[in-house]
Amino acid sequence: MSIKVYVPRDTTTLSLGGDKVAAAIVKEAELRGEAIQLIRNGSRGVFWLEPMVEVETDQGRVAYGPVEPRDVAGLFDAGLLAGSDAHALSLGKPEELPYLKKQQRLTFSRAGIIDPVSIEDYKALDGFKGLEKSLQLSGQAIVDEVKTSGLRGRGGAAFPTGIKWQTVHDCPPDQKYIVCNADEGDSGTFADRMVMEADPFMLIEGMIIAGLAVGATQGYIYLRSEYPVAHDILNEAISKAYNAGYLGQTILGSNKAFDLEVRLGAAAYICGEETSLLESLEGKRGLVRFKPPLPAIEGLFGKPTIVNNVLSLAAVPYILAEGGQAYADYGMGRSRGTLPFQLAGNIQQGGLIELAFGPTLRQLIDDFGGGTASGRPMRAIQVGGPLGAYLPESQWDTPLDYEAFAAVEAVLGHGGIVIFDDTVDMTEQARFSMEFCLEESCGKCTPCRIGSTRGVEVIDKIRSGVNVDANLTLLDDLCDTMIHGSLCAMGGMTPFPVQSAFKYFPEDIDLAITKSTSAEVH
C-alpha cells in the first residue's frame, strides 16, 4: 500500500521551491522502490516552515520543514516514510505545533489538511453540510442565521453581513447576483489567497448559500490577475462542483439553481472597492460609483447584488452548519467570530493566525511572531493594509477588535499586519502611503486625485527641511480635506498612515532632514 506524502501547492510554497521538493521526493521514492501517493495540499499558513512536507502514518500525520531538495535523500535515510523524528527537520505532528495549536480555526480548519480540489476530502470534514441544511430552509431563515452570527464584512469596512443580505433579500424577485471580492491587494495580506488555494469548495459553498438566501442564481468571483495559482485551483474546483451537482440548474437534485464563474481583474487596487469592482466586472473602467444607490439595490448590471469579501463568504458554511450562535460565541463586543490575522514584513515567523477577536496586538506578536527577521527591536506596526495607521509601541496593547482600533484612529481592515524594526524611516513610510494613493487612485474625485499628488510634494518639502512647521500645518489641512471630501476610502483613509507616521514618530523628521542635507553636501 502506498504511503501518502503531502507537499503544498500554494503560491508561497511554490515560491520557496515546493515543486522541486515534490519532484525530488517522487524521484527518491522511485530510486528506493518505495510506493508513495503524492498529494499537493494547500498550506496551513505556517509560512516560515514552508515547504512543509507531511507524511501519513498510523499515528496521524508527521511534518518536516522547511525542506529543500537537497534535504530529501537524508530525510529518506532518516525514516521519512515511517514518520521518524531522527532528522533535524522533524516537526512532529503538525497540529501540535504551538503556532497552530494556539489558534481557533473555524474558517481555516481544513487548510493544509485536504487536497483542495477533492470533493471527497472536503465532505469528509463537514464540507457542504451547511449547504445541505440551507436547502431545507427559507431564504429569510438563512439570512437570520447570518444575522445571529454577528458576521461583519472581512474586507475592511466591517459592515454587518446579515444586513446587506437582508437588503438584497427584500428586493423584488428578479435577477440578483452574488459577487465575491477576491481582489486582495492590501500589503501583507494573503488570507483570501489561502482560502482559494487551500479550501476552494468552502468559498463555493458560501456563495451558493448566499444565492439561496437572497434568490440569486448567478455568482462571480472577481479575482486579481496576480493570483494565477488560485485561478487554476478555483476553476478546477468549480468544474468538479458542477460535475457533482453542487452547481447548475438543480443543486443536489433540488429545484434551486446557481451558476458560478471566475473573472480576472487587471492589477488595479481601486477595484477592491465594491462599486469600482462592479464597474470593472461590467467591462468598464474601474471608477468608483456615487452612493446611493447602494449595490445591494442597484449593483451589477443595475440589479440587486451582494458584494462580499472571500473571508466573509468563506465563514458562511460554518455558520449554517453549526448555527449562527456557535459562531457568535467567539469574539468580543460587536466583533464576533474569528479573523485570520496575517503576519508579514520584518518578522521571523510570518504566516496566518486565525483567532477570535479580543487578544491584544502585542499578545499576537509575542505569541506568534518570534521577533523581527533582522533581530532588531520592533518600532512600528501597520495594521489593515496600506491605508491603515502605523502604530507605535504605546498602542500595541489595543485589543484586536473593530471598535477598539477605531478608538485609536486605526483600522483592523483585512487583518494584515506588517512589522517594521528600528531602522525604518517613518517619514519615508508616510511618503510611500501618499504615493500609493497617487498611483492607485481611480482619479474620479479631486480630493484623492489631486490631494495625493500635492501630498507627496508637501512631504518631500518636509523631509528636505523646507518651511517644516508651515508644511506640517499644510499637510494636516490637506489630509483633512481628503478625509472629508473623497468619494471613497482610497482618498478618505490615505491620511491615516500619513498622519500617524508624523504624529507618533516626529523625531524622524530631523533624521530625514539630516540625510537630505548630507546628500546635498556630497
Image (cartoon, grey):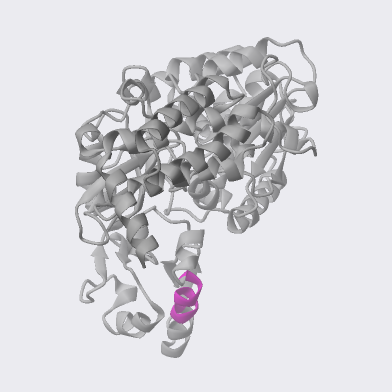
Asked which quadrant contains residue 68, the reply is bottom left
Q: Is residue 371 magenta?
A: no
Residue 459: image x %, image y %?
44, 42
Asked which quadrant contains residue 246, the reply is top right
Which residue is at the front of the view, 17 or 521?
521
Whether residue 105 is visible here, answered yes or no, is: no
- Residue depicted at x 32% and y 31%: 356
Quadrant of the rendering where the C terminus is positioned? bottom left
Magenta range is 18-25
Which residue is at the front of the view, 71 or 205?
71
Query: In the image, is residue 59 above or below residue 309?
Result: below
Query: In the image, is residue 430 above or below residue 159?
Result: below
Asked which quadrant contains residue 399, the reply is top left
Residue 438: image x %, image y %?
58, 42
Quadrant of the rendering where the N terminus is positioned? bottom left
Helix, strand or loop for the magenta stretch, by majority: helix
Query: In the image, is residue 474 above or below residue 280?
Result: above
- Residue depicted at x 69% and y 31%: 444
Residue farthest toward the bottom in the current orientation of the protein: 31
Residue 451: image x %, image y %?
56, 33
Query: In the image, is residue 504 above or below residue 436?
Result: above
